[in-house]
Image: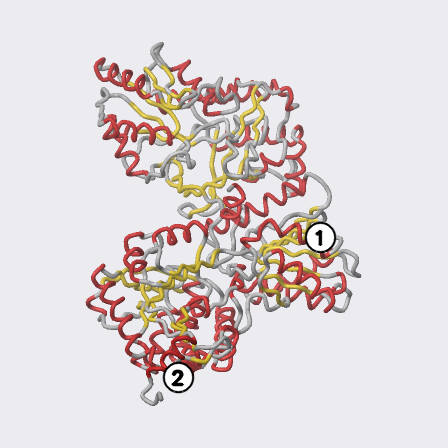
Amino acid sequence: MTEAEIIEALLAFIDRDGATEAEFERVALDVFAYQFANNQPYRRFAIQRARTTLTVRHWRDIPAVPITAFKDLTLSCSPPERAQRVFMTSGTTQGGVRGCSYHPMLSVYDRSMLVNFRARLMKGLERIEMGILFPDEEAMPNSSLAHYLALAKRECGTAASEGFIGADGLDLARLIAALERAQASGQPYALLGASYSFVHLLDALAAEGRRFALPEGSRILDTGGFKGQSREMGADAFYDALSDALGVPRSACINMYGMTELSTQFYDDGNATCPPVKSGPHWIRSRVVDPVSGRDLPEGSTGVLVHHDLAHFNCVSAILTEDAGIMVEGGFRLLGRVDGADSKGCSLAVAEFLKAARG
Amino acid sequence: MTEFAGHLPGLSTEEVEWRVLDFAAWGESVQVSVPVLSEAQSLALAARVRENARAYLKTRSVAQIVATLDKAVARLLDRDDPWRRKAEALLPIVTGYDAETVRLGLSGYLRTFRAPQLQRFLAEDFANPAVLDAFQPAMKGGFTRAHGPELLLHVWAGNVPGLPLWSLISGLLVKAGTVGKVASAEPLLAGWFARVLGEIDPRMGECLAIVWWKGGDADSEQVWLDQADTVVAFGGNAALTAIRDRAPVTARFLAHGHKIGFGLVSAAALDTRRAGPLARLVAHDVMRYEQQGCYAPQMLFVERGGKISPRDFAEQVSRELAGFARRHPRRALSVAEAAGVASWRNAEEMRAFDGEGRVVLGDAADPWSVVLVEEAEPLAPSGLNRTLKIVAVDRLDDVIPLIAPFRAFLQSAAVAATPEELFRIAALLGEAGVTRICAFGRMTAPEAGWHNDGRFNLLDLVTITEIEQSAELAAEGFADYVD
């Protein structure tokens, strides 16, 4: 298949109402064949794992690339210099080395994001007034989250929607004014951004002694965790505090789980109880594996998540994450990052070593 | 099965609140109840231990203390002793290490604490150990005496069986009132040792307590830190910093942070006759306690130019690791540990794609991993749990710049080389910060009297009281026999 054919097939697949496992598998095998033919480092990786287009018969057999590979290898089916956009990881986890995802064009990424976002966050609303707690695309051109939020604002936000993180950080005065307007208007309001920015907001509101009761139908979307950019908060404390400060029930506080190495996001249906069940649309499927052998674990066992995202067609679709998870009815529960444990003795382990090396 | 951890002289089981920790491995499970003391109980216990040590332990001679410790160690070495049987039955379930590793490890470790070894331990730090019993004449004139802490607090970490005994015994040798905080990962052995001591000498048993609080529980920790005049703490630098910052400024704080062990193999050791047995010893050090102890090797530097190439030696080490995997199966890994192993191996595999000169040996699903790198690479941790990187170098001296930047994390290095090479490279390693140089096969079994982290383990604990010559001479002037 050519790039144009793959893109056309994927756009059509995304636009369907759903897909059975067999239907997913057919497209997954096509995408694997495309990546095997056009992505040379991935081809070598697959051959080393004895997985080729001749031996792979099921989507679960398609070899998953560990996300660390995005830092060491150039994983792209099209020439990377022709990419319309390159999304990069923040480089906080591996000594400043940033993993790259190349997008020859953003049509599939954008379609995947919007179809899913409308279903999971908009829930029937055409548009909603949005406040964005993240820098814009101009400030962070290589951030997939900046692009995601810009797309949300442009396609699903009202004209009054605005971003509140500038070069000087959170513009609290402007945000408070927006929240006051929203509260008075009676129209639902959506606040979207990085989890750590919400912590900064909570601290700032607490310092000013401010609380809001946003109108019914208002919603919150946070993503990405705290990443050392704010104090760490437990999930329950975090959503209790958000709910308390903004008057949005925990069931309307949605957490998005996404990665630079994917073109599709996962959502929960609110955080009334934590950890909630996360799920994605029909063009992404997940497995829980034993990280050492790469084999599937039985449902109910804790392991490491593998995501198979057809929309990430230009890089690799199957990735082995560093996130622990457990498969449950209707999706999976996300149990946090596993970047290797401290030793059980006095041996120095990788995580502490890297931390020391970063100073 | 429920087992009570800790040793709380003066407190009955009923008075204390207990928390249950669940352990399971090798198809068996055990529940360990650990004590959760109230602040009042902790304060009372601290006072009791301090007072008992003053009234009894400090009045005993070092020789008497050595004799009692020796009896306790003998009990734990005796495979028919109920305590020893309990240790052999429960520690594999608690720690996950296989039963044979626990049995051999315990015996090997405890042997270094018999009376002759304890005397060596004392002799290493004190020219005249009697200085712990009474004033002894000093070379410069006058007299000196060494006093141990009134209340010594140990904060232990990790699950390598026996490691806490090292500092526990050090404290008792200098007659310290002793409180040890056990780690949740192995909360049992220190308490058993204290109870055995109590069976042998009940009054000595009341001079020490073994307690528990959840790691990071700042409130419980603070109560104890405020009581101690000396604190010995083990753990990662983040945990140590947190403890140090809360310890009273007047308390002596002795930290043992995480370390990274490595080995050097000279070309002289790599002929067809010697390489095989050496590979087995290397694999043994990697396998024993799954590289959890700081003395275990995580990286090997192998000199080119021998009859056996670094690549072939890496293959031999791999074969030996495969053999050990059958006799001593790797303990079941937590998801985080498995992810650590996988992420280390994956990263190496990815780099191996990028060019020649890097080989990942074995299958991803094997319970061990060896990576051979032909180009010099600085020291770095492996994924632990039987993962080893072997780096080929042209000359052993090339290793020094590869380890020198990590001075704060250096401790043990094994060397396989000719006598001449050993002393030359040892001088360079010592300058770079290595404090222990041993043979392969002995990395996880430091010898008796070892200076852990290059420190004087007993001397660091004591304070010296000096009677200066002037006082002695002045006293002469006040004697009733003065003319």
- Disc 1 marks which residue? B398
Q: Secondary structure at mark 1?
A: helix
Res B79 seen here:
no
Q: Secondary structure at mark 2?
A: helix
- Crowd band around label 2 with a 10 angstrom C-alpha radius: few (<14), some (14–19), many (20+): few
Which quadrant holds residue B12? bottom left
Q: Position of residue B405 (x, y in %)?
A: 60, 49
Which residue is tagged 2? B64
Q: Image height check: is B278 above or below B240?
A: below
Relative depth, front residue between B229 and B465: B465
Residue B463 coordinates in the image, percent (x, y):
40, 68
Q: Are marks 1 and 2 on the same chain?
A: yes
Q: Position of residue B364 (x, y in %)?
A: 59, 50
Q: Chain of mark 2?
A: B
Tell me if residue A338 comes above or below residue B97 in the rendering. above
Q: Residues within 10 Å of mark 1 (few under 14, many from 20)?
A: some
Please state, as top left, top right, bottom left or bottom right, where the C terminus of chain B lies in the image: bottom left
Left or right side of A320 for B29: left
Determine whether, in the image, residue A202 is placed left or right of residue A327: left
- Answer with left or right where residue B463 lies relative to residue A22: left
- Give the letter of the chain under mark 1: B
Is there any visible trace of residue B374 in the rendered image? yes
Asked if marks 1 and 2 touch (Cβ < 8 Å), the reply is no
Of B483 and A214, the residue lying toward us: B483
Amino acid beneath label 1 = Asp
Viewer-proximal residue, A44 or B242? B242
B415 up-or-down from B54: above or below: above
Which quadrant of the figure contains the N terminus of chain B?
A: bottom left
